[in-house]
Amino acid sequence: MNNIGHHPLKNKGKAILGALLAIALMVVLTSSCSNLIMTNNSSIWTSFDDYKAAAIRSVRGQRDFQTANHELETFRNTPHEWDSMTPASQQRSGSSRDGVLLVHGLGDSPWSFHDLAERLSADGYIVRTILLPGHGTKPADMLDVTAEQWQTIVNDQADALARDIDGNLYLGGFSTGANLILNYAYQHPDVDGLLLFSPGFKSFSFGWLAPLLASIKPWLITPTEDKPQQNEVRYMNVPINGYAQYYRSSITAQKWLENVYKKPVFMVVSEHDSVLDTDYLLETFNSRFTHPDSRLIWYGKLPDPGINSSRILVRSDFIPEERISQFSHMGILFSPDNPLYGRNGTLRICLNSTNSAQTAACEAATDSVWFSAWGYEEDNKVHARLTFNPYFSWQYGIMRSVLDL
């Protein structure tokens, strides 16, 4: 009787499969764990104005516009500088001016920081946002972008802002943007502090596969005309290469975080973030961001109440009077008054899970929709993505207390 487990053809197939898996793993480890974005690249822009003008030309020429107002859409998707000196802010800042560079996340745009930038500017800070390569135009433009290109823009514009101010230099980043500014800050002691919003240091996903998959299958969700690919200010579909480059930036961030960062850090995390390993973020804040004046805002419940301290501020992310079941990855950035993402904003993200019936019910409903992180479902409730932060003003005040040391 033949032993199927020792059939020569099957054994040969297993050997080939094992070899392919070994090669795949080698490719992944080689491509994802390399420190290619650890070092600075040479400057490619002489000024923020030159960089901004080039970004505007690119968006105007390549963007798949979603509205009839191309100029407004271009403004929302391109770099901007806020420099509003009022008498009150002059009194606060004195003779020197502090600067803040803000870097958006994967698939997003400078609009991510619109609300924060306006408030910082009114308080006397010079604030600049940037547009990462492959963003602001159409998702297909991210098919061949690299993390090195993202890092080059961040390095270049952080250098430019440092030259243009005579006060403190702060860097802020959302998700992937937090990885990029962390890479810069660890190498530049002249950075005076960091603002980290849902920092993408480590995710739950199988991101380590993305560098391999990107060379085999360009899209996780193949673009089709019947599915929205982007809205006015962000991509709704991202090529696998985008996830691969995010993953590479996260590996670099984790390597830097083997060391303590001693400058003040303001950090915001939602317990129910559907993207990030929030336990890792909490441990990172406690053990790596050690400055006594650093602050972590944690929306939800701490996994271990015993780790609470005066440096960690906790607020519930369940607000039934606002029909909020839990906070989301992106919602922490936006004011309730934001014209696109606020309480009465014109953009509602109903693609909040893979449940098509829930999506259709969300699009049809009005004042009965609840809000949550991606993927959350509950019986007898229809959920959209939460795109604003009811605690935005309080959060801003805590952030300012970290900046004004």
Image: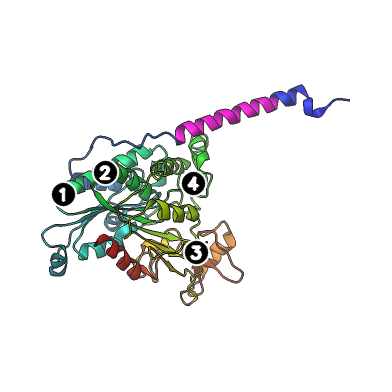
- Name the image quarter holding the N terminus: top right
Q: Which of pointers 2 and 3 lies earlier in the amino acid sequence? A: 2
Of badges 2 and 1, the one in the foreground is 2
**Label at residue 164:** 1
Amino acid marked by disc 1: Asp
- Which residue was labeled with disc 3? 306
Image quadrant where residue 86 sits: bottom left
Q: Which residue is mark 4?
A: 223
The residues tagged by marks 3 and 4 sit, at their Cα atoms, a distance apart of 47 Å
**Mark in the foreground, 2 or 3:** 3
Amino acid type, residue under disc 2 in the picture: His
Please check the rendered image and state whether residue 276 is part of the magenta-colored stretch, yes or no: no
Q: Are marks 1 and 3 in contact (CB under 8 Å)?
A: no
Is residue 323 or residue 305 the one in the foreground?
Answer: 305
Residue picked out by circle 2: 188
Q: Dominant secondary structure of the magenta stretch?
A: helix
Element marked by disc 3: helix
For the residue marked with disc 3, what is the amino acid? Answer: Gly
Alpha-carbon distance for marks 2 and 3?
34 Å
Residue type at mark 4 is Pro
First in residue order: circle 1 vs circle 4: 1
Q: Nearer the viewer, mark 4 or mark 2?
A: 2
- Alpha carbon distance from label 2 to label 1: 16 Å
Q: Earlier in the sequence, mark 4 or mark 2?
A: 2
Of helix, strand and loop, which one carries label 2?
loop
Task: Locate the C terminus by quadrant.
Answer: bottom left
Alpha-carbon span between mark 1 and mark 4 = 42 Å
